[in-house]
Image (cartoon, helix red, strand yellow):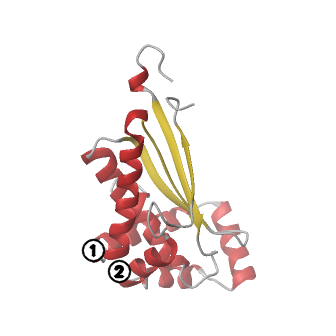
Amino acid sequence: YNKQNPESSSANFSIGFVAPIDEAEDSYAVGRLVQILGGDANSRLFKRVSQEMGLAYGIGSSYIAQNNAGTINVGGSVQATEAEKALDATFHEMDNLKNELVDSDELARINRNAIYGLAKHFETNEGHVGAIEVKWDRGLTPELHLQKMDAVTPEMVREAANKYFPTSRADGKYVLLLRDPLKE
């Protein structure tokens, strides 16, 4: 809460919804979907809601699929007076991914970044141990993991969006937390 200028106060929001666990066949498509939505500075949310509309100080999404629980989280920090606009824009971007195919170049960029991240992770002892653990537990080798990542198509991403993203802001299964100091 900004006491000197309440209109400049920040609000934080978090939207969470159910997603597949990491062993599900469509978990790779969901991983790509979440990365495209809000995974980095090239994401849909960052470009549209933060840069173009100027509604978010920071915004992103993440996918957690371990320990037999899968969740997608979308959240950000926004100007409190613009929180509803930012939420509407966020749901609009999710709707776009449900209705349009992602560009194959965009998907290729996400895959390149993921392959780089995986290679970098394997340079660590933790990465080696993790690879051994996943091989023993699930029979998943790094090569098979890369093949499954590469096999994701724009159609699979759209299908995952339709399966896991909320139907709409007004009608869908999700949890929304909005910490707005102007309303508390």
Circle 1: is it few (<14), some (14-19), or many (20+) Cα within 10 Å? Answer: few
Instruction: Give the residue number, with chain letter if any, for mark 1.
Output: 103
Which quadrant, please, contains the C terminus?
top right
Tag 1: amino acid:
Asp
Q: Is residue 11 above or below residue 69?
A: above
Q: Which percent across, then down, holds residue 105?
A: 27, 73
Tag 2: amino acid:
Pro
Q: Is residue 49 left or right of residue 167?
A: left
Assign a secondary structure to mark 2: helix
Q: Is residue 142 left or right of residue 108?
A: right
As drawn, the label of residue 29 is none
Q: Nearer the viewer, residue 55 or 156?
A: 55
- Which residue is located at x 29 percent, y 77 percent? 104
Q: Nearer the viewer, residue 180 or 56?
A: 180
Which of the 4 image quadrants contains residue 82?
top left
Q: Which percent across, then down, holds residue 38?
A: 42, 57
**Chain-order first, disc 1 or disc 2:** 1
Circle 2: is it few (<14), some (14-19), or many (20+) Cα within 10 Å? Answer: many
Which of the 4 image quadrants contains residue 53?
top left
Q: Is residue 69 above or below residue 157?
A: above
- Which residue is located at x 39 percent, y 25 percent? 8
Instruction: Give the residue number, with chain letter if any, for mark 2.
Output: 154
Q: Are marks 1 and 2 in contact (CB under 8 Å)?
A: yes
Residue 115 visible: no
Q: Nearer the viewer, residue 72 or 177?
A: 177
Q: Is residue 4 above or below residue 32?
A: above
Which residue sits furthest left? 52
- Which residue is located at x 47 percent, y 20 percent? 2
Query: Cα distance, mark 1 to mark 2?
Result: 7 Å
Residue 26 visible: yes
